[in-house]
C-alpha cells in the first residue's frame, strides 16, 4: 500500500502562525528595529536613537516582537538588552532584505 503524499496546503493552525510571523515584518519601525538587532544586542535607548522613534514606541514594538517569540530580553542590572535568538528569524530577515535589494537593481 502506497502512502499518500502530504498535502501542499497548510493546515489552519500552521497558516495562522506563519501569517502572524509575517505580520511582524509589516511595520517599518519593527523592520528597522529588527535590522538593528540583527547586527547586535541593543537596549531601548540605543534602539530609539538608531531608529528615530520614542523609547515608548520602541518598548511597544519590542513587547509585540517578544510575544511573537522573535526577540529575547536579557537584564543587566537596570538595563534590558534585546536580541534575536532564533537563526530562522535572522535568515528570514536577511533573505527579505536581499530580495528587495536585488529587485531594486533591476530598475
Image (cartoon, rainbow, N blue to C red):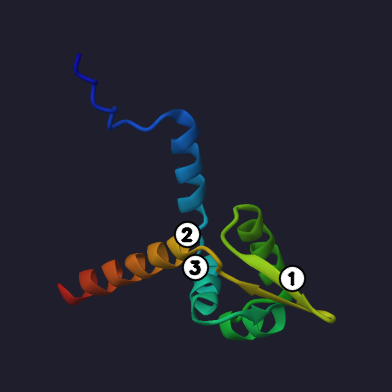
Location of mark 3 (residue): 31
Front residue (pair 6, 101): 6
Q: Nearer the viewer, residue 2 or 60?
A: 2
Label 1 crowd (10 A; few <14 / some 14-19 / many >=20): few
Residue extending farthest left: 106
The residue located at (50%, 32%) in the rendering is 13
Secondary structure beneath dot 1 equals: helix
* Residue 20: % across, % down: 52, 46
Image quadrant holding the C terminus, namely bottom left
Q: SS class of the residue under badge 2?
A: loop
Residue 71 marker = none
Report the number of discs: 3
Q: What label sits on residue 56 in the rendered view? A: 1
Residue drawn at the location 51% of the way across and 73% of the way down = 32
Q: Quadrant of residue 75?
A: bottom right
Up the image or down, 94 lies above or below 7; here it is below
Which quadrant is the N terminus positioned in?
top left
Where residue 66 appears, as percent x and y from the top left, is 65, 59
The image's mark for residue 25 is 2
Contact between labelled residues 1 and 3, with CB atoms less than 8 Å apart: no
Give the CA separation, mark 3 to mark 1: 17 Å
Q: CA distance from mark 1 to mark 2?
A: 19 Å
Front label number (1 vs 2): 2
Label 2 neighbour load within 10 Å: few <14, some 14-19, many 20+: some
Residue lying farthest to the right in this orientation = 78
Which of the two labelled residues, at mark 3 and mark 1, occupies the earlier sequence position? 3
Amino acid at each position: 500500500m502506497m502512502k499518500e503524499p502530504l498535502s501542499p496546503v497548510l493546515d489552519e493552525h500552521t497558516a495562522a502562525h506563519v501569517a502572524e510571523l509575517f505580520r511582524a515584518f509589516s511595520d517599518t519601525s519593527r523592520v528597522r528595529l529588527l535590522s538593528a538587532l540583527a547586527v547586535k544586542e541593543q537596549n531601548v535607548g540605543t534602539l530609539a536613537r538608531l531608529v528615530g522613534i520614542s523609547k515608548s514606541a520602541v518598548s511597544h514594538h519590542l513587547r509585540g516582537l517578544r510575544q511573537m517569540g522573535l526577540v529575547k530580553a536579557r537584564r543587566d542590572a537596570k538595563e534590558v538588552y534585546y536580541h534575536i535568538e532564533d537563526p530562522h528569524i535572522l535568515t528570514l530577515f536577511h533573505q527579505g532584505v536581499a530580495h528587495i535589494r536585488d529587485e531594486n537593481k533591476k530598475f
